Amino acid sequence: MLKVAVLVSGGGTNLQALIDAVGSGSIENTEIVKVISNKSGVKALERAEKAGIPSEVIRKADFESAEAFDRALIDSIDRSEAELIVLAGFLLVLPPALVKKYENRIINIHPSLIPSFCGKGYYGLKVHEEALKRGVKITGATVHFVDEGCDSGPIILQKAVNIMDNDTAEVLQKRVMEEAEWKILPEAVNLIAAGRIKVSNGKVELT
C-alpha cells in the first residue's frame, strides 16, 4: 500500500481528484495518509476532513525563521510515514533538504506543457494568461518529479488541451483542470503505486 501525503495551498481540486480516484479504485493500493496546508481555512482542508484524512496547517508566519518552518514541514511528512509526496497546488518552494531526502518521491502538477510557461513566477492564472497572451493554440498539464530547480524535474505524464478563440484565463484554467490535471495526476500516482515508473539519467521510464 503506497502511503501518500498531499501538500496544498488552496481549493484542493486536484486533492479531490486524488480522493475520488482512490475511492473509485482507479488508483490502486494507495492511501492518502495526510494533507498538509501552508494556509489555514482553505477548501482543501474541508475536503480532507470530509474524506476522513488527517490534516495539518503549517504556516510560515507561525515560525521564527524559514529554517524552523522547513524543519516543521519535514517533520510532519516524516511522521506521516508517506512514501510519496504530491504537490497539488502547493504554492511554496520546497526546502532543499526535503527534496534531497525524498528524491524521486515528490511529484507536482503544473498547468502547462513544460517547458512552456513554467519556472519562477508561473503558477495559477498567470500560466494561462501568458499562454493566451502568446497566442498558442494548445496548452495542457504536466506531472513531473520535483528536483532542486523550478518545474525542472523529470516529466512523468503530459496531456494537451486545445485553446479556443474566446477563452479567458479563467475559462482556460477550468478546461485544463477538467481535461488534463484531474486525469493525469491520479494516473501518475497509480503508475507509481504499481511500481511502473523508474527515473534513469534524468528521464522517466515506464515499465
Image (spheres, rainbow, N blue to C red):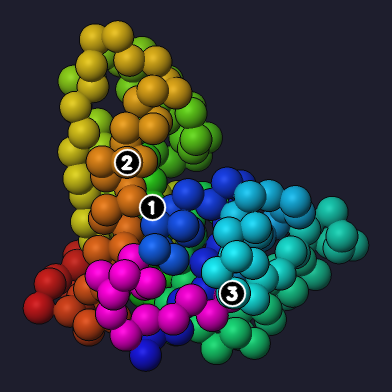
Q: Nearer the viewer, mark 3 or mark 1?
A: 3
Q: Residues within 10 Å of mark 3 (few under 14, many from 20)?
A: some
In the image, taking residue 130 as reference, residue 166 lies left or right, namely: left
Q: Picture quarter containing residue 128? A: top left
Q: Which residue is mark 1?
A: 109
Residue 50: percent from left, percent from top: 60, 65
Marks 3 and 1, how far apart at CA: 21 Å
* Residue located 37% across and 81% down the image: 30
Q: Which residue is mark 3?
A: 53
Secondary structure at badge 2 equals helix
Secondary structure at badge 3 equals loop
| Observer-nearest of 53 and 87 | 53
Inspect the image, locate mark 3, and give the three-letter code of the amino acid beneath it.
Ile
* Residue located 44% across and 66% down the image: 19
In the image, taking residue 129 as reference, residue 77 lies left or right, namely: right
Span shown in magenta = 21-34
